[in-house]
Image (cartoon, rainbow, N blue to C red):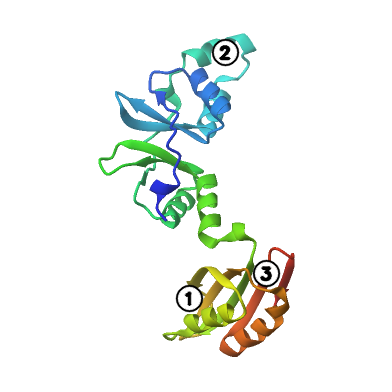
Amino acid sequence: MLVNNWMNREIVTLDAGDSMNQAVKFLRQETVSLLPVLDKGKLVGVVTDRDVKRASASESTSLKAHELSYITDNIKVREIMTRKPITVPWDYAVEEAAELLLKHKISGAPVVGADGGLIGTISQADLFKAIIALTGLEKRGIKFGLVVEDRPGAVKEMEEAIRKYGGRVASIMTSYNDVPAQHRKVHIRMYEIDRKQLARLKEELATQARLLYMVDLREGLREVY
């Protein structure tokens, strides 16, 4: 899943010569986490709520409200924006974008196309939506966590067991964190399974792997082994 499929294409931008008050207005009206700043059509920075608060704090000392309003109306966006912003390429995988935001401790970033031009923005909320869709969470099925032997066919055997009891696999995710050598963790989400068959399915899966947990999101049942 690529950033291009999940980014926000309805971009609200500022011009570097706009006033700080204009930035505040857009942040409030559009309920966005960042505003890309353009200068002659080129991306030169971003303005976030943090930038506005930092600038407001530096100007607010002992000023009356009308005086502060006059000053902020004359402060230009170029004076408060974050320059050289972190950008996300349009063809990044969503997990790469999430890693980038986490690394730089930011809530969102402009998305640039193949030519480097601004084509959208991506936020934490957009990435949360992508992850929910990627894992199949919205189907409210059953999820198993298991430690399996890392060999060809091991995951396929578990898929076949799930199908045998009427289930359909929505997503499979694996990792090699905190497992013995020659093993891996597998997280399988399934749906459409007859709950009366669930105990038998667990027994069969337990012969193929070590069960870690089971979560039944439809019934609100959670088991940790």
- Give amino acid for label 1: Tyr
Of callouts 2 and 3, the N-terminal one: 2
Residue, x 52% and y 13% (percent of image)?
71
Q: What residue type is labelled 3?
A: Val
Looking at the picture, which amino acid does disc 2 mark?
Ser
Where the N terminus falls, by quadrant? bottom left
**Residue visible at 58% across and 10% down?**
67
Relative to residue 74, is residue 127 depicted above or below?
below
Is 104 left or right of 114, judged from the image as shown? right
**In the image, what residue occupies the spot 30% across and 36% down?**
117
Helix, strand or loop at mark 3: strand
Badge 1 vs badge 3, beta-carbon distance below 8 Å: no
Residue topped by disc 1: 176
- Element assignment for label 2: helix
Compared to 119, does 196 lie above or below?
A: below
Q: How crowded is mark 1: few (under 14 residues within 10 Å), some or many (20 or more)?
A: some
Q: How far apart are marks 1 and 3 (CA)?
A: 21 Å
When the figure is inspected, residue 190 is found, relative to residue 148, above or below; the finding is above
Q: Which of marks 2 and 3 is in front?
A: 3
Is residue 139 something one can see in this rendering? yes
- Residue 211 at x, y percent in the picture: 63, 81
